[in-house]
Structures are given as C-alpha cells and as structure tokens.
Image: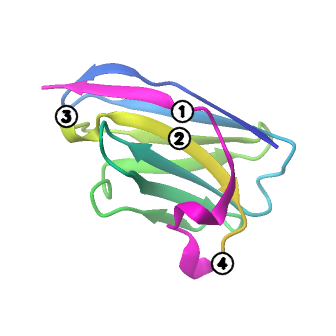
Amino acid sequence: VQLQASGGGLVQAGGSLRLSCQVSGRTLRSGTVAWFRQAPEKERDFVTAIRYNGYEYYADSVKDRFTVSRDNARNTVFLQMNNLKPEDTAVYYCAAGNPILSQTRVESSYNYWGQGTQVTVSS
C-alpha cells in the first residue's frame, strides 16, 4: 500500500488549498483514510478522516473550514481547506488503516502513511 500526498503550498490567510492523497494497493471502499498535520516542534495531530462508509470526522479546530471527500474511481482522497489561518501551517500527512470507530482519531491506528506535503499560511 502506498499513499502519495500532494497539493501543498504557500497561501495567504483567508485563502484556500486542496490536498490530494492518491492511494494505491488498497481500495477506499474498505478501511479509513485520515489526514494528520505536524507543525514545527509540535506533535502530529489529527485533522480529519473519512471511513469506508463515507462518515467524516473533523478536529474542532478545522470544523466548518475543511472538508474531506473521496473519489473511489480514482482511489483518491481530497482535503479542501478554506479560510486558512497561520496556525494551519504544518506538514500534512495522509494515512490509511482500519481503526475501530473509537480509534478513528488516533495516529497509531493507521498502518500506512504518505510522505507529507507542506502547507504554509502567511498572515
């Protein structure tokens, strides 16, 4: 299983970016794909996840600004990020796994990780 994250970049506060996570070797119709992020000198934090049944989960800090979606035909998960803030600056990672419902937000529940893509939001 391989995950390839892309779409990061530099954007001004209030702007938007869309990240993509291309998944190979695994169907999106099973398991869960999540996004985590890690800011400099901070731990990696949960951002959002989409489970096999389409249910979506969000961190409180991104709710109403970020939207996760997927294209099963392209085996790709997207993260649409709107109204970006400087505190959203981080390396964003996509991950795949089979967490039970209560562990959806837990980093250790995910077996496969992409390489990360840098998102920088200027004030």
Label 1 or label 2, whichever comes before in sequence order:
2
The stretch of residues the image draws in magenta is: 100-123
Percent x, y for residue 13?
Answer: 18, 29
Percent x, y for residue 43?
Answer: 37, 51
Report the mark closest to the observer, 1 or 3: 1
* Residue bearing the label numbered 4: 100
* Residue bearing the label numbered 2: 93
- Inspect the image, locate mark 4, and give the three-letter code of the amino acid beneath it: Ile
Q: Secondary structure at mark 3?
A: helix
Percent x, y for residue 49?
Answer: 54, 59
Image height of 55 relative to 114, above or below: below
**Residue at image point 24% right, 38% down:** 83
Residue contact between numbered discs 1 and 3, judged by CB atoms under 8 Å: no
Q: Secondary structure at mark 4?
A: loop
- Crowding at label 4, few (<14), some or many (≥20) Cα neighbours within 10 Å? few
Label 2 or label 4, whichever comes before in sequence order:
2
Q: CA distance from mark 2 to mark 4?
A: 20 Å
Q: CA distance from mark 2 to mark 3?
A: 18 Å
Q: Secondary structure at mark 1?
A: loop
Residue contact between numbered discs 2 and 3, judged by CB atoms under 8 Å: no
- Crowding at label 3, few (<14), some or many (≥20) Cα neighbours within 10 Å? some
